[in-house]
Amino acid sequence: MSSQIEELKEQIDDLDTSIVSLLNEYIYFPLLIRIIFFFIIKHFTNYKERAMLTLDIDNVKKASGDIKSNEPHDPAREMEVYEQIQKINKGPLSNNTLVSIFREIMSASLSLNKELKISFLGPRGTYTHQATVNRFGDSVIYSAQKTIADVFNSVEKKQVTYGVVPFENSTHGTVTQTIDKLIKTSAKVRADMYLPIHHQFLSKSSDLSDITKIYSHPEALGQCQKWLNAKMRNVQRVPVSSTSHAAELASKELGAGAICSSVCADIYGLKILDRDIEDLQDNTTRFFVIGQSYEGPTGNDKTIFCFTVDHRQPGALCNALAVFKQHDINITKIDSRPSHQHHWHYIFVLEVEGHIEDESLKEAFVELNSICTDINIIGSYPKSKEL
């Protein structure tokens, strides 16, 4: 099976090289010719052939009967394509432009195989919505959910193919609603992605002095503390389920404002009264893609899991963490959450480098099983680059 897939991928890579070349030539054409040329590319040439090769790969995967290999979304292959087209690009189109075009090409190919439905923390206009569209393009079906828990539930009940949830922010840390669901869910993390976050202050009012109430998601409020304390110290702050919902509420109420994305200004007819109000300008959020399973190893992966130890045993946590040092495995993140079993008993969530199928991690988990009272693998996924 693997040799068949590799051969088909090589054919796709050759087509991608041709498509990049054609797109860079097409930019020089007059507008009318460019429109006609784009129509030809989309409907009659390499684009169609590429889509058919993608279907061939999906058919080979289906024939294997392996649930992991049968997943329509392959995050490692996706990154491989983006890296390849940027490597061969000689301009004049920018790498970002080509990535955007190929995102839509791959989105259309995904939708050919099966009806792909993606849930996200809504409504439309949230940062999670932006991150989701950035990942999956415009050719799939989207399902906005009211809460992070609803996104998980939609995946667990197989109402959607995948879900996208915010996991951590560079300014405000881990999203507790997400990590609490990760501990309990049957869904698996299969990919991560980064989105630069820039908060704007929106309102129907024309001046900041008219504002008596501010709506936003708790994470966004936390990421804008300096601005809030400097300009809105005595104004009521109301936490809501999402930044987009905050904009919706502000659009219905005079004297109310919302901390959200600039996209919400157009969606809800609001004015931008102040821009980029986040405490840190390099503010970035990492999101997880969750599904029924995770992909196999790529050689450059991360794994997230949770475990508990016997808190009555001195050094129990230290002994668990020491296992990873002994196997030369790097721990990149650690969190603790109340277990709800009894007071002051915690579940620890770790992210480490490597894939759960790597020999080094397999050996580490054999040892960990003798130390921990419970272990749950939440997912393994290829490392993403922070943009």
Image (tube, helix red, strand yellow):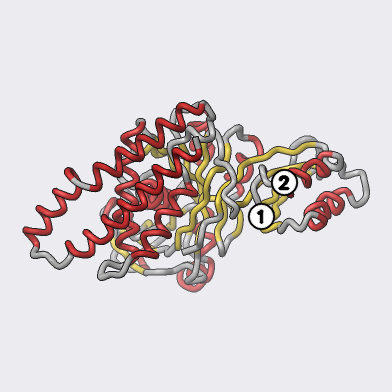
Q: Secondary structure at mark 1?
A: strand
Residue 359 is labelled as: 2
Q: Disc 1 vs disc 2: Cβ atoms closer than 8 Å?
A: no
Up-down relation of residue 88 to residue 355 (above or below): below
- Quadrant for residue 259, please give it: bottom left
Up-down relation of residue 163 to residue 239 (above or below): above
The amino acid sitting under disc 2 is: Glu
Packing grade of label 2 (10 A; few <14, some 14-19, many >=20) is few
Q: Secondary structure at mark 2?
A: helix
Residue 55: x percent and y percent? 35, 35
Packing grade of label 1 (10 A; few <14, some 14-19, many >=20) is many
Q: Nearer the viewer, residue 226 or 31?
A: 31
The amino acid sitting under disc 1 is: Glu
Residue 298 is labelled as: none
Left or right, residue 113 beside residue 75 = left
Residue 351: x percent and y percent? 66, 52
Residue at (59% x, 55% y) in the render: 300
Residue carrying label 1 = 353
The answer to whether any part of residue 245 appears in the image is no
Residue at (66% x, 55% y) in the render: 353
Residue 172: x percent and y percent? 58, 61
Q: Earlier in the sequence, mark 1 or mark 2?
A: 1
Residue at (50% x, 66% y) in the render: 283
- Quadrant for residue 334, please give it: bottom right
Disc 1 from disc 2: Cα separation = 13 Å
